[in-house]
Amino acid sequence: MVYSIVNALNRISSGEQTIDQVGVKDLMHSRLIFVKPTDSIKKAIMIMKENDYSQIPVMENGKVLGTVYQKDLIGFASNPTKANIKVREVMGVPLPEIDENAKIGMIKSVLESWGAVIVKRKDKAVGIFTIYDLFKASKI
C-alpha cells in the first residue's frame, strides 16, 4: 500500500500524471475503520478522537449501513449519561460508494459534498478516500 501511494505521489510531482488522473485505490486508506450499529456512542467518539476522524462508517457483515458524523455526537460528548446509546440510534445515511478503479477527478464533486467516500471492489468495502487524502496529494 505504501508503495502505491509513493508511486502515485511521484507520478504527480514529476508531471507524469495530474492528480485527477490518479486512481482512488492508489491513495485511499485501505484500513477501513468502522463501528457496528450495536456499538455505543462512547466507542464511536473514542475511535473518532483517536484517529482524528470527522465521520466513521457504520458496518455489519461487510455492508455499509450508515455513517456517524461529528455533528451528530456533539450533544453526547458532554453528556456521559447517554454514552451507552447505540450507534444505530444516531447514525446518518451511508457515505457514497465508488469503485476502486475510479479516478480522483471523477469524485471531486462528491468529496465537496460528503468529505469522504467508501471505496469498493465488487461488492466489498475495501477502503475509504477522504478530502484529506486529496489534500495530501496536492502540490500546494
Image (spheres, rainbow, N blue to C red):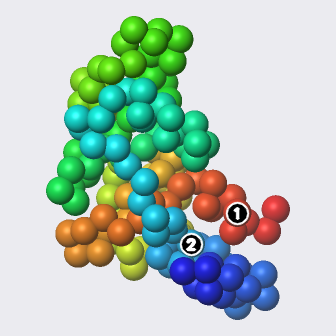
Near mark 1 (Cα within 10 A), the count class, few <14, some 14-19 or many ≥20, is few
The amino acid beneath tag 2 is: Leu
Residue at figure coordinates x 62%, y 61% from the top left: 134
Apparent side of residue 56 relative to residue 9 in the rendered image (left or right) = left
Residue at figure coordinates x 22%, y 60% from the top left: 62
- CB of mark 2 within 8 Å of CB of mark 1? yes
Quarter of the image that includes the N terminus:
bottom right
Residue at figure coordinates x 43%, y 54% from the top left: 33
Residue carrying label 1 = 136
What secondary structure is marked by label 1?
Answer: helix
Whole-percent x, y for residue 106 in the image? 46, 67
Whole-percent x, y for residue 133 in the image? 61, 61
Residue carrying label 2 = 27
Label 2 – label 1 distance at C-alpha: 9 Å
Residue 17 visible in rendering: no
Apparent side of residue 102 relative to residue 63 in the rendered image (left or right) = right
N-terminal label among 2 and 1: 2
Whole-percent x, y for residue 15 in the image? 76, 86
With respect to residue 27, does 39 lie above or below? above
What secondary structure is marked by label 2?
Answer: helix
